[in-house]
Amino acid sequence: MQKKYKLLFVCLGNICRSPAAEGIMRHLTEQAGLSDRFEIDSAGTYGGHAGDLPDPRMRAAAAARGYRLTHRSRRITDDDFERFDRIIVMDDTNYERVHRLAPDRESIQKIYRMTEFCRTSKADHVPDPYYEGREGFEIVLNLLEDACQGLLDELTTTVPKHSL
Ligand code: 4NP
């Protein structure tokens, strides 16, 4: 069986931004007929919400766009650096924490910022919506849709066919 390309999205609590990124990316890979080529997961640098479904505000905002978010929150582990091909973080704080946890140089090279993949937005991070109103969740979803499409386009054009 062909090896899957493994993506891990990471934020702080793993109940807002990264599970939404996971849901959007899953949706896009399904639409592209590539879902069997990818493994997509998410995690947080903080484990205080472990086991929880995504925040109800994020679930509602995502559902309105056709994404069903069913991920259960978990904290990033040492094994994730071995397991995943790319670890994609939402903001600078996530970057610093994940960078500090990375066991070796190869793992550090797997860390990317989500906004690197945006094609229309010029944002340099995906802002934490937890203490924001509804608008904050819409801003996050707009950025994540832009970045996920850019990421899929990049992977389908640059990653050799045999490894996708
Ligand atoms: P996330 O949002 O990192 O996008 O999942 C947050 C979720 C929970 C908390 C902060 C941000 N919190 O402080 O519990």
Image (cartoon, helix red, strand yellow):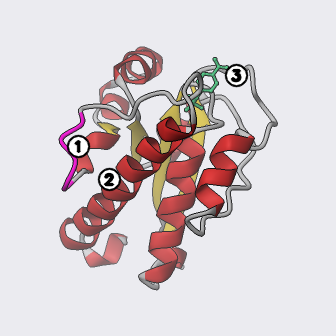
Q: Could you say where residue 9 lies in the image, as x and y percent from the top left? A: 49, 43
Q: Could you say where residue 133 lies in the image, as x and y percent from the top left? A: 57, 32
Residue 122 among magenta residues: yes
Kindly identify which residue carries mark 2: 147
Label annotation for residue 88 = none
Kindly identify which residue carries mark 1: 116
Q: Nearer the viewer, residue 62 or 19?
A: 62
Do the CB atoms of the residues marked 1 and 2 lie less than 8 Å apart?
Answer: yes
Q: Nearer the viewer, residue 12 or 76?
A: 12
Q: At x 63% / y 45%, what residue is drawn?
A: 58
- For the stretch drawn in magenta, the main secondary structure is loop
Q: Could you say where residue 43 lies in the image, as x and y percent from the top left? A: 60, 37
Ligand 1: does it lie within 8 Å of the C-beta at label 3?
Answer: no
Q: Nearer the viewer, residue 66 or 22?
A: 66
The amino acid beneath tag 2 is: Ala
Spatial distance from mark 2 to mark 3, Cα to Cα?
25 Å
The amino acid beneath tag 3 is: Gly
Regarding residue 2, the answer to whether it shows in the image is no
Secondary structure state at the residue bearing disc 1: helix
Regarding residue 59, the answer to whether it shows in the image is yes
Residue 154 in the figure: left or right of residue 63:
left
Secondary structure state at the residue bearing disc 3: loop
